Amino acid sequence: MVSGTTIAQQTEISIEKYQMKNICYNPYEISHGKSFLRYYKFTFHSYNSVFENYRLFNEYDNMMHIETDLYKLNYSNPISNYSYLDKSPKVITNKKTIEIVLDEDDMKKLYQSNSATLVFNSDLFGSDYYGLARPWDRNYPIPVISLSLNKSDFDYELAECDKKYNIYNEEYEEYHSKPTNRLKSFFGL
């Protein structure tokens, strides 16, 4: 896949560390309808707290996208629709750390490639990051994070998610197999 981003000047963001893990959970009490959510979270810790304007990250949809040789994945916060739930994971954003949450379909697309580039909107970064004396000069290089993707990491997290689902499914089936609980569910109690 060729995009305008690969042609434009890029600057690599220095990352202290990053990790990926699953966020798989049931958002409801087990007595309610069956529901199980599968998300995967990347956490990026920068060395120099470079995400100066981090508040923009969740306010606008064009703050980041992911490019691979096969796909361009536009980022939006998929868990924001579930923010009213107590068990909902929260996306941490501050000057040092940004967490990106992807749904399972996007994760599968991502891991069809061996590498990916996270492309950030330069508005997330202050002019100090670019060493510019004139902040009105908008010819910023495009900030990116390059990732090597390991399929076994994704397979491990997928298997962990499946384990959580199996436990949830057993508990759900056990709860709803009891006659009194079936009656409560039927009458919405």
Image (spheres, helix red, strand yellow):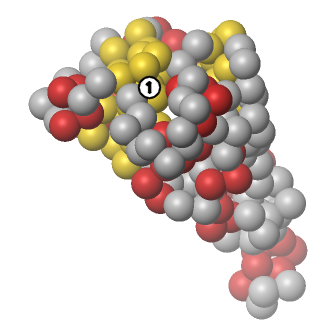
Tally of numbered tags: 1
Percent x, y of residue 74: 37, 48
Q: Position of residue 162 (x, y in %)?
A: 58, 32
Image coordinates for residue 137, horizontal then vertical, percent:
44, 43
Q: Quadrant of residue 93?
A: top right
- Element at badge 1? strand
**Quadrant of image for the N terminus:** top left
Residue at (71, 14) in percent of width and height: 47
Whether residue 78 is visible, yes or no, is no
Above or below — where is 45 with respect to 70? above
In the figure, residue 38 lies in which quadrant? top right
* Residue that mark 1 sits on: 144
Location of residue 73 in the rendering, given as x and y in whole percent from the top left corner: 34, 43
Q: Residue at x 67, y 12 (%)?
A: 17
Picture residue at 75% right of the left edge, 35% below the top: 95
Residue 116 seen in the figure? yes
Residue 117, relative to residue 58: is it above or below?
above
Toward the viewer: 68 or 2? 2
- Type of the residue with mark 1: Val
Classify mark 1: residues with Cα within 10 Å, few (<14), some (14-19) or many (20+). Answer: many
Q: Quadrant of residue 147?
A: top left
